[in-house]
Amino acid sequence: MIIAYGQKAFSNTFSIDTEEIISRSKALYNSWIRLERFGLLAFKYVTGRYWYNNSLAGILMILALFASATTWAYLFSKAHNLGAKFHPALFMIPFISAPILAEMLGFLLMGDDVACALMFVSISLMCAHNAYQNRKELKTLLAYALMALIFAIFGFTLYLAMTTVFVAGTVMIAIIIKGDYACKFKNIVSYIFTYICVFIASYACYVILNKIVISTNHTFTDPYIKEQMRWGKDPITKIIHTIFLHAKNMYLGRTIFHSVFITIALIALVLLTIVQVIRKELNAFTIIFAIAIVASPMMMSVILGTAGTARTELTYPLAGAFSCMYLLHYIMQFNKKTLTTIIACVLLAIIGLSQSFTVNRLYYTEYMTYNRDYYIAQDVARRIEVLQANHKKPLKVIFVGNHIADHNPSEFKSNHLELIGRSMFEIGFSTLHGTWVKAGFIRSTTGFKMETPVLESAYISAEKAVQNLPSWPSNKCTTVLDNKYIIVKF
């Protein structure tokens, strides 16, 4: 954990959206309601973290991640009936060091909350398991079922992608808790049905609560939610091709967030399951669960009909860690315990270190990029002040274009990154969006305040006005338009 997250814990860097919570917290919190993440806002209030502290957020994120990994390891360790208990490290090391989690939790404004959401889902699964185990005692059954429902709702309201984590977690528990060959098919059906009931009830409660919150706040669901869904918008052939291409990149480990080691572990899980079925150690339907675990990282892409962002593929690190745990535990059960334990530890170290090095390099890239961005922010603020000094009335600022960071060889290049590690001056889907991001970053890092235009026509005029203007860092990258706007070109 120190190798992977030490850089993040003890530096004060941040990425997109975190600067927004620093400089315009109320606007960002309101956007969470529109993004159907009202649980995030409530959790901030309840835990006394409404006023954001970037240094505190880094520490809390790491503590929450460790707690989450521990609860998941405890869940698998206590739930299974396949012999000796799983050692927690077999799951925790591959899980904690996963680059996808680093990308997700690197958004420190909600990193600790998402880690807690992962923990809540694991607790919900524990309670659902206990509810089934106590199904003959009505009061105990209802108590555990209620707790499972509450914790699932907590997780879903914090981050809706937890629904995929719940589903994947259910399959993983099913493959170990009901894996004995003596188990009857009807028992596994009734066992999974318990989780299905909890999932449906908790998701229904989430939908109802979301509608109530949206209504009471007199707002609406952000179009961003519906825009992500491509089913019914793009041709089926295009969607299938996109999903297939994304699966190919994922399982071949072609991105910094996916690893060939994890793919090997997933395939080995299926092969091991087949061998155990042939040996009559497991029921045949266990193979279906193993295949489902292999396919679970693609769940979000299939739901959206497009290649989802890495940070939403939370089932990938979960499936990878589970597969590693299952396989390494199996290796350690051979007769020559000392030798097999050493082999398992070496394999665990290879996976853990390879992923940790990637995470460390990702956060190192973010750290170096942040320092360069801070210099740019100071330089741009100084140039704006010089132009503003010649005008009595405050001029509104517009940023046109983006600046691609010049990464050193030890950093990840921009084409390898998603958002963590990317320059704040590189982010901007349009002039309006880019101005919003850049102005927010300059405000949150330097304290320099500036106003930006509201009308879209101002941004269109700015784009036309700077067509022949050189880009930053040229001394002529700024100009004044109509004595109303200061334009900075990147």
Image (spheres, rainbow, N blue to C red):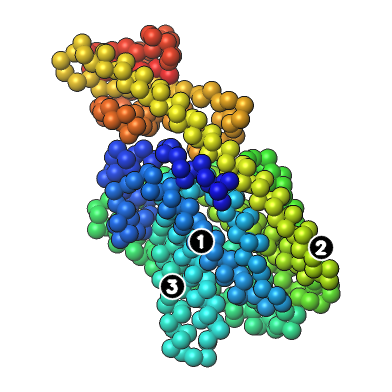
* Residue 157 showing in the rendered view: yes
Q: For the residues marked 3 and 2, what is the alpha-carbon distance in whole angstroms?
A: 44 Å
Q: Amino acid at mark 3?
A: Leu
Where does label 3 land, which residue? 149
> In terms of sequence position, does the residue under pointer 3 or pointer 2 come before the other?
3
Circle 1 — which element? helix
Judge left or right: residue 237 versus residue 227.
Answer: right
Q: State which mark lies toward you, 3 or 1.
A: 1
- x, y (%) of residue 425? 43, 27
* Residue 232 showing in the rendered view: no
> In terms of sequence position, does the residue under pointer 2 or pointer 1 come before the other?
1
Where does label 1 land, which residue? 68
Q: Nearer the viewer, residue 343 or 16?
A: 343
Q: Residue at x 43, y 27 (%)?
A: 373
Q: For the residues marked 3 and 1, what is the alpha-carbon distance in whole angstroms?
A: 18 Å
- x, y (%) of residue 290? 70, 64
Judge left or right: residue 283 versus residue 322.
Answer: right
Establish if 318 lies above or below 22.
below
Mark 2 is surrounded, within 10 Å at the Cα level, by few (under 14), some (14 to 19) or many (20 or more) other residues, namely: few
Mark 1 is surrounded, within 10 Å at the Cα level, by few (under 14), some (14 to 19) or many (20 or more) other residues, namely: many
Mark 3 is surrounded, within 10 Å at the Cα level, by few (under 14), some (14 to 19) or many (20 or more) other residues, namely: many
Q: Residue at x 43, y 47 (%)?
A: 58
Circle 3 — which element? helix
- Label count reads 3
Task: Give me the disc on residue 339.
Answer: 2
Pointers 2 and 1 in contact (C-beta within 8 Å): no
